[in-house]
Amino acid sequence: MTLFNEFALILTPDVLSRIAAYIDEPTEKTSRATDALIYTIVGGLMKRTTTEIGVNQLYKYLQKGNYTGSVTDNLEGVLRDPAHTNTLITQGNDVISHLLPAMKSSIASMVSGYAGVRNSSAISLLGLTTTIVLHVLGKHTRERKLDANGVASLLFAERDALVTAVPDELMPTLIEKIGLQQVVAGVAGPARRPDGESARTTDTVMRPPVTYELTDAEQDDNGSLAKWGIGALIALLIGIGGYYVYQNTQEHAGEEPAATEISTLGDSIQTADTVARSLAVPVDTSKQIRAAPATAATTATGMAVGAPPTPVPNGLSLQLTPYLANPTLPKGRVFPLSGVAFLPGSLSMTAGSQAAINELVTVLKTNPVLQIQLIGFATDGSAGLPNKTLSFKRVNVVKQQIVSAGIDYLRVDAIGRGTGISPKAIPGTVTPVPTKIEFKVVVK
């Protein structure tokens, strides 16, 4: 059973009714907002535990905050007391301010717009939901005797469940607000605290760095030795230099001065020629190294080595250019990202996929106002990687390629729709969409 199944069992209709009455919002909107906050907090804690500091901080709060599951075991009874409810809300908002700093307002705004509740109600629900999430995590920590690394692993075990559970209309906003691009795409994982005693303690003891400072007497002695050593070294160098000058003078006495051949590149060669001409001494240029022109090496096929890859046209530019150039055509048109394909049941792209992505990158760079939404469909999922999860991870792989090519991530949304069949559809009445990736023009 996933953590989200546990939350569903805790947030019963009676519990949600009491919460709705407390914040003075309709039960349906309260339920929608609470679900969104569960996804947001769990996802935010996943992101937080990608760093060792975040792992330590979450574990410390679970230990010191006495999050044992006592509240969630009888949440309906706890919510009967408004004063106790207010305490839970205050406690949760204080913790979320530390675990997800500077994100409280943006989360409340997102949930308010998604569920249609007031912003103040979203703030109250955020505090209460945070307390519920921490009690569930704390209960698992106590019962399983998890350390900090175990808590982080527990959270990341819910990654696929999170991708599957979050509604399509919430997912893009949630990812951007919390910064979950790397997490949901499977690129980021939980950080691990170092083994040993420090990993078993709740608070990290900061030890000052060990320094070795000399006493005044030692500094005086060392200073005197350093001065004598430097003086001796200078005298030795002067002696060696004088002897070398004397020997060189004796060897070259009576000889005519000759121009030194300079076999360096560029300006050095020109300097040698100028010196030789001024002394009327011919210069043998046969030994000089001439700089080769700075051109890219080519292969037997004539392709420049190291030259930027030229996108292979797949018709995308031909379709997009007239559409984007015509202001009378409305935004929202969907284009197939033909040429991008994945190996069955995996996140590995086929060999020719990069050329199609390069062409899309070129279009985005040529049209700096253009914003798109990548939409993925999959029918080759498995029990370990459901179709919705697979489709979502695939479009994020494509998005990562686009962002890595220099496109602002805010210009590219990514959403996975699985087979394209709504869970509410009657089985057999809708045909699954073929496995593919397409994109919608959001802003042109």
Image (tube, helix red, strand yellow):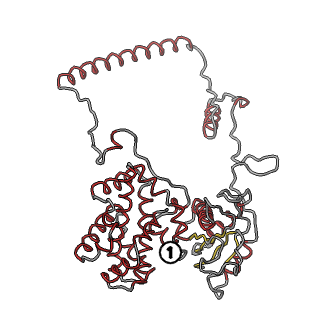
Q: Residue at x 41, y 72 (%)?
A: 37
Look at the picture and state if 214 lies above or below 164.
above
Q: Residue at x 28, y 17 (%)?
A: 228
Measured from the top left, where is residue 419 in percent x and y? 66, 72
Q: Is residue 372 left or right of residue 134?
A: right
Look at the picture and state if 59 lies above or below 5.
above
Q: Closest to the observer: 346 or 137?
A: 137
Q: Residue at x 41, y 53 (%)?
A: 151
Q: Is residue 394 left or right of residue 204?
A: right
Q: Residue furthest bottom?
A: 328
Q: Amino acid at mark 1?
A: Leu
Look at the picture and state if 340 lies above or below 255.
below
Look at the picture and state if 259 lies above or below 248.
below
Q: Closest to the observer: 306 or 349?
A: 349
Question: Considering the numbered disc 1 on the image, is that residue within a helix, a strand or a loop?
Answer: loop
The image quarter in which residue 311 lies: bottom right
The image quarter in which residue 62 lies: bottom left
Q: Residue furthest right?
A: 301
Measured from the top left, where is residue 263 in percent x and y? 64, 31
Residue on which the image places disc 1: 170
Q: Is residue 16 left or right of residue 165?
A: left
Q: Closest to the observer: 54 or 318?
A: 54
Q: Residue at x 51, y 59 (%)?
A: 183
Quadrant where the C terminus is found in the figure: bottom right
Q: Closest to the observer: 165 or 314?
A: 165
Q: Residue furthest left?
A: 216
Measured from the top left, where is residue 226 in percent x and y? 28, 21
Figure disc tally: 1
Mark 1 neighbour class, 10 Å CA radius: few under 14, some 14 to 19, many 20 or more: some
Measured from the top left, where is residue 423 in percent x and y? 60, 77
The image quarter in which residue 424 lies: bottom right
